Amino acid sequence: MGIKEYDVFVIGTGTAGKMVAKACAQAGKKVGIADNKAFGGTCALRGCDPKKVLMGLSEILDRSKQMQGKGVKSLPAINWEDLQSFKETFVDAVPMATEKDLRALGISLYHQSPYFLDENSLSVEGKTIKTKKVVIATGNKPIQLDITGWDLTLNSDEFLNLEKLPESMLFIGAGYIGMEFAHLAASLGVKVTLIEGVERPLSRFDEDLVASLVKAMEANGVRFIFNAEVYKIEKLRKYFRVSANQNDKEIEEKAEMVINTAGRVPAIDELSLDQGKVAYSKEGVAVNTHLQNTTNRNVYACGDVADSSGLPLTPLSSFEAELVIDQILENKKPNKVDYPNQPSVVFTHPQIAMVGLTEEEAKEKNLSFSVKCKTQLDWYNAKRENHAFYGFKTLVDKKTNQILGAHIIAPQAAEMINLFTLAMNLKLDTQALKKMVFSYPSWGNDIKSMI
């Protein structure tokens, strides 16, 4: 078997894992890193990046549909196979490039999921690993549905790699992934049904703007079924039959393909955390305010796998990785994680974005605030591109005049919310924002009229 000794051993090669491994190696530490999938992580290989490439085509189609009769005579013909080939140009080189970068720093690579033997020992590829520090950065994975026939569903990874599109799809779960994939499929001509167990999608987002997004997606061909709990999936000759309970009534739906978009869970089941005396829960590896495990102080966790206050977003994985690096290398005295305001975006069309508090959260905190909420289809940017949905809601503290929360539904909401995030993290008040000189006409310039 053999024994290998390291100063730091990292589990996971996504954004957070790579950052920690590289920084520690550059500081002279002996580092090992392992992954049971291709090196590169979820975002680059089976998440944000390939998803956005595919959605680029739906954005073109959506814009073309909006401008029909206003300069556009016919919609572009689509070729899914060509789009998939284009997507692979972003994905294919990632594993090899990642391994090359890590090896160049003298980092040992392992292509298997390690598991704990004790507090400071791991087993991987038949070798025993002795290490001073372990960093768990395994991210998350699609949740396994507790329903009969769950194995007949495809997950998000498989959706992104479909060789061809079916005539009909049914998605189970209307979170970020379900909403984005349902919109993408519908834009490309697939008959789409989206089933959600509660009364509305996207519970973190403003209720009023989410209602507008649902209307926009329905106009694009997505059929929603709310308050429905799926309990069985069956394979028929051509279709799958999905049985659900909706408000105490049995309903059945049929589709050629069923996609599990019900959520994701921390990827920790292969790590034997109990043997390493590593505390964890269904939310992930238990960490303190320094991202250090609460029971095994030699273990850190960062990114989506950590049960922290950070959102499961790539930029937050980087943010947490920086803190873990500082702890391990003792660059600074142990600091508590001080999360900045974190924007969230659902990349549908239109996009919906938020940062800060919702109106309900601000009320629960008994804050004194003003609300500005409007649908602005008569604004120039909406009119020049013939958009049917454009609105916002902003919350401003009456005492400080600073922004407590911003919520936008717009074609460029992802870019617009970044300006609100900047203002909130720099504690700029509304007057400072209004005095800014932005380019015109631009979507960013519109935010001055939202406060």
Image (cartoon, rainbow, N blue to C red):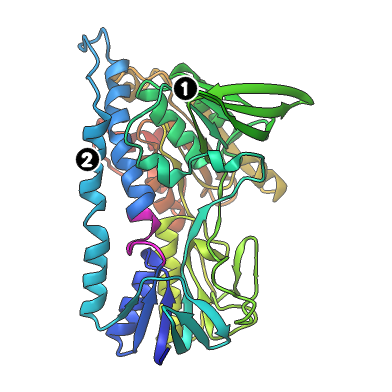
Q: Which residue is mark 2?
A: 85
Q: Which residue is mark 1?
A: 216
Asked if the magenta segment contains residue 384, the reply would be no
Helix, strand or loop under label 2: helix
Residue name at image x 29 percent, y 23 percent: 61
Mark 2 is surrounded, within 10 Å at the Cα level, by few (under 14), some (14 to 19) or many (20 or more) other residues, namely few
| Residue 53 visible (yes or no) | yes
* In this picture, residue 231 sits left or right of residue 122: right
Residue name at image x 26 percent, y 52 percent: 91
Residue name at image x 50 percent, y 19 percent: 218
Disc 2 to disc 1, C-alpha distance = 29 Å
Quick one: quadrant of the N terminus?
Answer: bottom left
* In this picture, residue 376 sits left or right of residue 203: left
Q: Nearer the viewer, residue 12 or 288?
A: 12
Number of the front mark, 2 or 1: 2
Q: Nearer the viewer, residue 368 or 343?
A: 343
Extent of the magenta region: 36-44
**448 shown above or below 44:** above
